[in-house]
Image (cartoon, helix red, strand yellow):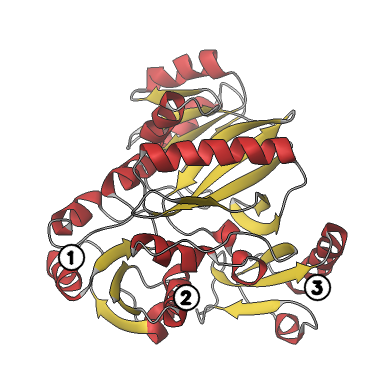
Amino acid sequence: MRIGIVGAGQLGQMLGFAARDLDIECRFVDPSDNPPAASCGEVIRAPFDDPAALAALAASCDVVTYEFENVPVDALRAIEAEVPVYPPADALRHAQDRLDEKLLFGRLGIPLPGFHAIHTRDDLDTALGKLGLPMVVKTRRLGYDGKGQFVVRERADLDSAWATLGTVALIAEQWVDFDYEVSCIGVRNVGGDIAIYPLSRNVHRDGILSTSRSPVDAPSLADKADDYTRRLLTNLDYVGTLALELFVRDGELLANEFAPRVHNSGHWTIEGSDTSQFENHLRAITNAPLGSTASRGHAGMVNLIGQIPDAARALPHGVLHDYGKAPRPGRKLGHITITTRTGEERDALLDIIERNVTQYA
């Protein structure tokens, strides 16, 4: 069995590591020099939308998947006639456009903050009257890790928001004064079997995920998140791993966005779950039985941003995952995972790691 993966970054790398344990061969398409996943299989060096490269990938693989959501949908649809592509292109289309994504949540009865489509400068005034202040103006496409966003805190900011972002399609979203953020990771295989991981509680800094911890001691929230994630997986006829990110406010959930791929907030599953999100993604797209998503205790993850300090390599506890990428401000270079017997032990250890080894540059 050979799997083609569009993208050879750290998510592709972790898929490659999981593939070895399943006796699956991987082949990648990526334009980078020596990307992280190069150690896991052959890399066709080409742009992600290069027709010849994708055709070569499709011709040499049994199934194709992707590690990030900015792959051109048309490029994937062009090879679907030759080889199964999972997750399906329609799920990717919804995830790539924030307006389509919000409309999907609404159709499925998944609660979400207010929003308004922005096509003209006047639409910003309409959105302000509808959503109030502050509100967040975002590009409908291609934003990630806090990029492509403008927070409008007063009416005078509207002109600046339009000048900064108004050359592309936009969406205005209601500001959510949330208590905390969570994500629910689910997986569905070709046969329609679904498995859901315990809820993760996440903290972001400067729009980039900083820490995750699981499980979350909130059974009612976990049940609702499980339900919403199953609605998405089923409605989209989804195959693979998916992450639904949600705000928690006053004991209720509001959907933020979903990612049609393995997800940073699920890295704790590598050591902290019976079956990692990466292994289950591979099982799903090859229609193998899904593995158990049960936790092996209380798990946590700390992202390493900008650089990996020496202290991270000398930790008495935890597992360091080094992606092998060159240091750069704001770049995800690795992460540390821990698994403990109790939530209290986990939280205390995460606090120690954050104070001593994390760098936000």
From mark 1 to mark 2, how far is it between C-alphas?
27 Å
Q: Quadrant of residue 341?
A: bottom right
Badge nearest the viewer, 3 or 2: 2
Secondary structure at numbered mark 1: loop
- Position in image of residue 170 (x %, y %): 39, 32
Dot 2 falls on a residue whose secondary structure is helix
Residue 241 x/y as whole percent: 45, 56
Residue 90 left/right relative to 323: left
- Placement of the C terminus among the 4 image quadrants: bottom right
Residue 76 placement, left or right of 299:
left
Residue 153 lies left or right of residue 237; in this view the side is: right
Q: Nearer the viewer, mark 1 or mark 2?
A: 2
Compared with residue 87, is residue 302 higher up or lower down, i.e. above or below? below
346 vs 207: above or below: below
Front-lying residue, 321 or 120: 321
What type is the residue that disc 3 sits on? Answer: Asn
| Residue 21 shows in this picture | yes
* Kind of residue indicated by mark 2: Ala
Q: Which mark is residue 50?
A: 1
Sequence order check: which comes first, mark 1 or mark 3?
Answer: 1
| Circles 1, 2 touching at the beta carbon (< 8 Å) | no
- Closer to the camera, 243 or 289? 289
Q: Please provide percent x and percent y for residue 28.
A: 30, 74
* Residue positioned 82% across, 58% down in the render: 343
Residue 29 visible in this rendered orientation of the protein:
no
Q: What residue sits right under mark 2 in the picture?
A: 18
Residue behind mark 3 = 356
Q: Secondary structure at mark 3?
A: helix
In what quadrant of the picture does the N terminus appear?
bottom left
- Tell whether label 2 touches label 3 (CB within 8 Å): no
Disc 1 from disc 3: Cα separation: 43 Å
